[in-house]
Image (cartoon, rainbow, N blue to C red):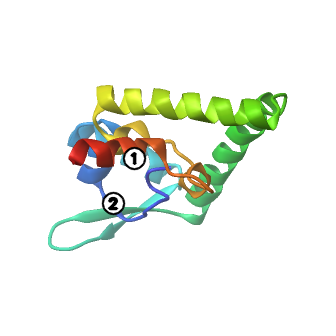
Amino acid sequence: MVLVAPPGLSVTELGRRVGLSQPAAARMVDSLQAAGLVQRRPGSWREVRVTPTPAGHDAASRLLAAREQPLHDLVSVLDDDEQHALADLLAKLLARLYAEVGSSELLCRLCDRASCTAGATCPVGHAERDQDR
């Protein structure tokens, strides 16, 4: 999901966001490119930007959908009050994880950013802002 939002990261920045060295990130991009999921484009100066292809966007969408349905089915057994309580507990746990990991990019690399903050504040982003104060 890191490559989909925002697209056009450098290989080095992509590696930083997913916790890989630059050489390991370059090998990962090589594999994704060979599978037709990303393409390299010239950036500024010597930088190379990595952007998802249409097939890459489709793969990301399929991955999110495959993850979303089982989670939706699981949480649907809870009533509204229980779902709110679960959301509060998960927010507390995510803030704690952020304190340990120290990087929202690394922690949220598989986040569905389009829906994770729908109607709410991202707990990881909130923890990051609190730390910066």
- The residues tagged by marks 2 and 1 sit, at their Cα atoms, a distance apart of 24 Å
Q: Residue 50 appears at what percent x and percent y?
A: 37, 60
In the image, what residue type sits under mark 2?
Answer: Leu
Q: Residue 30 appears at what percent x and percent y?
A: 38, 48
| Residue in the image at 57% along x and 49% along y | 116
Answer yes or no: is residue 132 visible.
yes
Q: Is residue 48 above or below residue 45?
A: above
Q: Residue 126 appears at what percent x and percent y?
A: 39, 46
In the image, what residue type sits under mark 1?
Answer: His
| Residue in the image at 65% along x and 53% along y | 61
Disc sitting over residue 5 in the figure: none
Frontmost residue, 17 versus 107:
107
Q: Nearer the viewer, mark 2 or mark 1?
A: 1
Element at label 1: helix
Q: Crowding near pointer 2: few (<14 within 10 Å), some, many (20+)?
A: many
Answer yes or no: is residue 26 visible.
no
Q: Which residue is mark 1?
A: 126
Q: Is residue 64 above or below residue 94?
A: below
> In the displayed structure, does residue 101 sit left or right of residue 88?
left
Q: Residue 88 appears at what percent x and percent y?
A: 58, 34
Frontmost residue, 93 versus 48:
93
Q: Is residue 52 above or below residue 124?
A: below
The extreme left residue here reads 45
Q: Which residue is mark 2?
A: 9
**Quarter location, residue 58:** bottom right
Element at label 2: strand
Q: Is residue 98 above or below residue 4?
A: above
